[in-house]
């Protein structure tokens, strides 16, 4: 394989993982599944960011972005998990109520 | 530069609320006092920033690190307008909470101060950020603090609304981040100005959809009413008046600063805005609870802001741009006043069911009056800030031959009148109240509504600057 094709795998895989995660985030009813799906989608995006063209030296800015993104993602996940536990204790089920317009 | 404004002053609007917010975890007493002190400091700092001459940009490389690895903050006229209006609204809400929430619901008030300060710090950092990735980080900080505000009541509707909000925001920020990745790879920079004209349509679309989800812009608005209505009144005021504007602010910078030439996209944004005005207003009309009416009215009012994009035609100056910014400011003031009044109505009657809003005109006339004054701005009647803003938008619509958008502006005002009068009318029927609303908090809400009204009279100087001076 040449230097161009290898990095492209990151982009294609990244976008596939992103779409798979985003789909599950909406389709899965269980809140824990939604949370994991959101994390999966974010990981896909990190793969796309980390891509550097021509297989050249790694781009320090892209790496800084991914690292910061991971920190943000951890914070959001921790908060969402705590909220999920509280919601489950209050309503007795790990699902959202339907029909917000009603 | 002749003005003696030191760049480090840019750090104050972020550092003060952030530091005070962190101290809240250590304090057991005096939380409201610390919040008010830090808030006053922020207000003074942002007013000092007015000394920066128009048309110049004040810059600060945080920690001495240059871009692209460091964080670069900058201040232009648009940022100044948002910093000042945010400071006024947030400080008024903090004062209201210190006087009222601390007495009426002390258990909730204890946890109110930290998220308020974090929301404020995140907003200020967002207004000062110059690159798309820093905007992403500040947007996430804002979301976390905003969701905390929703959860304060700690009952099932609040937790459910908060979870829904968090999940939509998570999806939105992931879409936005993918857009940032494409933005960076296509332009080689994260800076909004440096990338001007080179942003690929895919990046623009992904970032816009992500921001629309986070900002509750139609058709991605369904999470907003349950979340905003579930928060305690000062929290709802912050969420509806300030938090949702963050997405609009980034959209403005993105579409006018970085990507000024996408006709089809602009019209699509305008159509979403039209949908928001119609659908949001109709749902506001059919709600049975006061807080939900005010929340759906936010959905509708955010729609007007989207009309700026087709009307401004990519111009960073002119009547449409100035009108859009001023509409955001006036709506913030009026909506904060409305939610604070709604909180006082709930305190007075013990509920907020519109069919049973009896006795308000007799026993809480000031609160009902405040609601009406705030409604005048939402309807866009003179002399309110909403009127001047809509006038500018109408000027732009007729000036550029895009009269269909004018119909949306005028029709939306009519619908706002109907849902405002429905509540005022209900308040005029006779009835007995549970307890009198406190005097001080009523005046704070009235001052906010009055400022929204005065925003039309005293708007000349900032509006002229916004129309003329490109950042």
Image: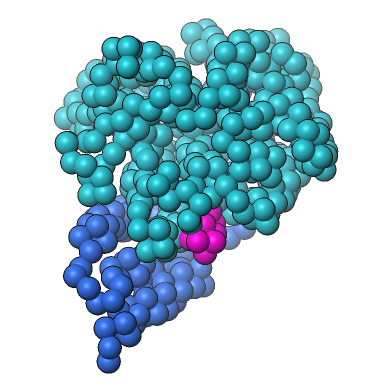
Residue at position x 22%, y 36% in the image: B62
Q: In this view, does B290 lie to the left or right of B426?
A: left
Residue at position x 71%, y 26% in the image: B392
Say whether residue B356 is magenta: no
Q: Is the magenta stretch mostly helix, strand or loop?
A: helix
Question: Residue B360, percent across and down?
Answer: 68, 16
Residue at position x 24%, y 36% in the image: B61
In the rendered image, the quadrant that contains the N terminus of chain B is top left
Question: Residue B273, percent across and down?
Answer: 68, 46
Q: Give the range drawn in magenta.
A: B200-209
Say whether residue B201 is magenta: yes
Give the farthest residue toward the front.
Answer: B1
Which image quadrant is residue B315 in?
A: top right
Of residue B62 and residue A29, the one placed in the foreground of this image is B62
Which image quadrant is residue B307 in?
A: top right
Q: Can residue B58 be seen in this view?
A: yes
Q: Chain B is drawn in which colour?
A: cyan
Of residue A34 and residue B367, the one placed in the foreground of this image is A34
Q: Which chain is depicted blue? A: A
């Amino acid at each position: 394989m040449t230097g161009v094709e290898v990095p492209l795998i990151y982009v294609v895989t990244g976008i596939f993982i992103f779409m798979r995660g985003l789909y599950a985030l909406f389709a899965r009813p269980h809140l824990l599944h939604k949370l994991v799906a959101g994390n999966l989608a974010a990981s896909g995006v990190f793969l796309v960011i980390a891509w550097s063209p021509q297989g050249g030296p790694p781009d320090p800015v892209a790496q800084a972005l991914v690292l910061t993104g991971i920190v943000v993602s951890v914070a959001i996940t921790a908060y969402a998990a705590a909220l999920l536990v509280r919601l489950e204790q209050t309503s007795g089920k790990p699902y959202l109520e339907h029909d917000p317009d009603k | 530069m002749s003005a003696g404004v030191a760049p480090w002053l840019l750090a104050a609007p972020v550092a003060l609320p952030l530091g005070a917010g962190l101290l809240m975890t250590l304090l057991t007493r005096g939380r409201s006092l610390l919040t008010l002190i830090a808030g006053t400091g922020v207000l003074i700092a942002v007013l000092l920033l007015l000394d920066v001459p128009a048309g110049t940009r004040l810059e600060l490389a945080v920690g001495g690190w240059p871009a692209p690895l460091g964080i670069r903050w900058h201040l232009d006229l648009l940022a100044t307008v948002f910093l000042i209006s945010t400071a006024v609204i947030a400080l008024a809400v903090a004062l209201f909470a210190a006087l009222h929430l601390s007495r009426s619901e002390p258990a909730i008030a204890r946890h109110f101060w930290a998220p308020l300060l974090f929301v404020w710090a995140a907003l200020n950092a967002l207004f000062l950020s110059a690159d798309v990735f820093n905007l992403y980080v500040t947007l996430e900080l804002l979301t976390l603090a905003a969701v905390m505000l929703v959860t304060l009541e700690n009952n099932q509707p609040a937790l459910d609304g908060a979870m829904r909000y968090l999940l939509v925001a998570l999806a939105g920020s992931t879409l936005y981040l993918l857009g940032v990745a494409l933005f960076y790879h296509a332009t080689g920079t994260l800076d909004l100005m440096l990338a001007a004209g080179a942003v690929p349509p895919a990046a623009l679309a992904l970032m816009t959809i992500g921001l629309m989800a986070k900002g509750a812009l139609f058709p991605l608005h369904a999470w907003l009413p349950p979340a905003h209505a579930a928060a305690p009144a000062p929290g709802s005021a912050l969420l509806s008046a300030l938090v949702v504007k963050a997405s609009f602010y980034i959209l403005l910078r993105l579409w006018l600063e970085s990507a000024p030439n996408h006709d089809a996209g602009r019209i699509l944004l305008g159509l979403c805005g039209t949908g928001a005005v119609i659908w949001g207003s109709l749902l506001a009309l059919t709600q049975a609870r006061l807080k939900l009416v005010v929340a759906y009215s936010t959905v509708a009012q955010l729609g007007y802001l989207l009309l700026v994009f087709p009307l401004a035609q990519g111009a960073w100056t002119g009547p449409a741009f100035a009108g859009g910014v001023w509409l955001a400011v006036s709506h913030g003031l009026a909506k904060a006043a409305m939610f604070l009044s709604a909180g006082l109505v709930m305190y007075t009657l013990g509920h907020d069911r519109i069919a049973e809003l009896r006795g308000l005109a007799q026993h809480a006339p000031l609160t009902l009056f405040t609601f009406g004054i705030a409604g005048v701005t939402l309807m866009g009647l003179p002399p309110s800030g909403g009127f001047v803003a809509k006038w500018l938008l109408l000027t732009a619509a007729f000036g550029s031959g895009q009269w269909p958008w004018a119909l949306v502006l005028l029709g939306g005002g009519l619908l706002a009148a109907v849902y405002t009068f429905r509540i005022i009318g209900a308040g005029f029927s006779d009835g007995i109240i549970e307890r009198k609303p406190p005097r001080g908090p009523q005046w704070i809400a009235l001052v906010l509504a009055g400022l929204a009204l005065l925003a039309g009279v005293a708007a000349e100087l900032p509006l002229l600057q916004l129309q003329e001076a490109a950042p």
